[in-house]
Image (tube, rainbow, N blue to C red):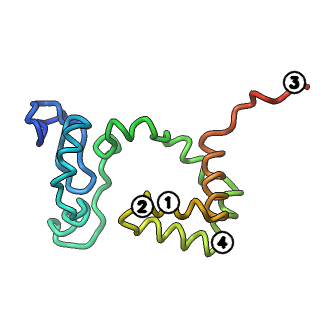
Amino acid sequence: MRAPGPCAECGAGGAARYRCPRCGTAYCSVPCCRTHREHCAPEPRQERQREAAGHGSPPEPAPLEDILSEEDEQDRVPPEKLKLLGESEELRDLLLNPHLRQLLLTLDQARDKSSLMRKFMQEPLFVEFADCCLSIVEPPEKENILPE
């Protein structure tokens, strides 16, 4: 892992531990991230990397440490739990539904994902999908079960 450089927003040397997922600019904190977002170029980082390389092949994905901000870190699901999603028969069965797959594609391609997510959470099929994913990565605790 490379050593952090200076923050593009406040100039703090060696403190820029985070990177903007849209343009790749390095910053050091949540306040600097917010400042950067106000004037960040809307062009996605990956598109710029493809153009710079002169071809359409996908670039190397950025390390998680560069993409996640301090706010995102607390909501991060560990990779070992994410692998459980791929092993779930129930989730695979749900994903066979073409309507659900279309909803997921639409969500993936949307600019305003959060408002679309709120809308989709009114769809019973999408709620079932979300609940299934959550039950896999965060199994319910057995606090109300009586011992046998």
CB under 8 Å between callouts 1 and 4?
no
Labelled disc at residue 117:
1
Q: Mark 3 or 1 closer to N-term?
A: 1
Measured as percent of width and height from the top left, residue 98 is found at 62, 75
Picture quadrant of residue 28: top left
Number of the front mark, 2 or 3: 2
Q: For the residues marked 2 and 3, what is the alpha-carbon distance in whole angstroms? A: 43 Å
Number of the front mark, 2 or 4: 2
Q: For the residues marked 2 and 1, what is the alpha-carbon distance in whole angstroms? A: 6 Å
Q: Amino acid at mark 2?
A: Lys
Picture quadrant of residue 27: top left
Q: Mark 1 or 4 closer to N-term?
A: 4
20 versus 18 height, above or below: below
User: 28 left or right of 140?
Assistant: left
Q: Amino acid at mark 4?
A: Asn
Which residue shows up at 66% across the image and 61% down it? 92
Number of the front mark, 3 or 1: 1
Measured as percent of width and height from the top left, residue 20 is found at 24, 49
Q: Residue placed farthest to the right in the image?
A: 148
Q: Of helix, strand and loop, which one carries label 3?
A: loop
CB under 8 Å between callouts 2 and 1?
yes
Q: Mark 2 or 3 closer to N-term?
A: 2
Residue hosting label 3: 147
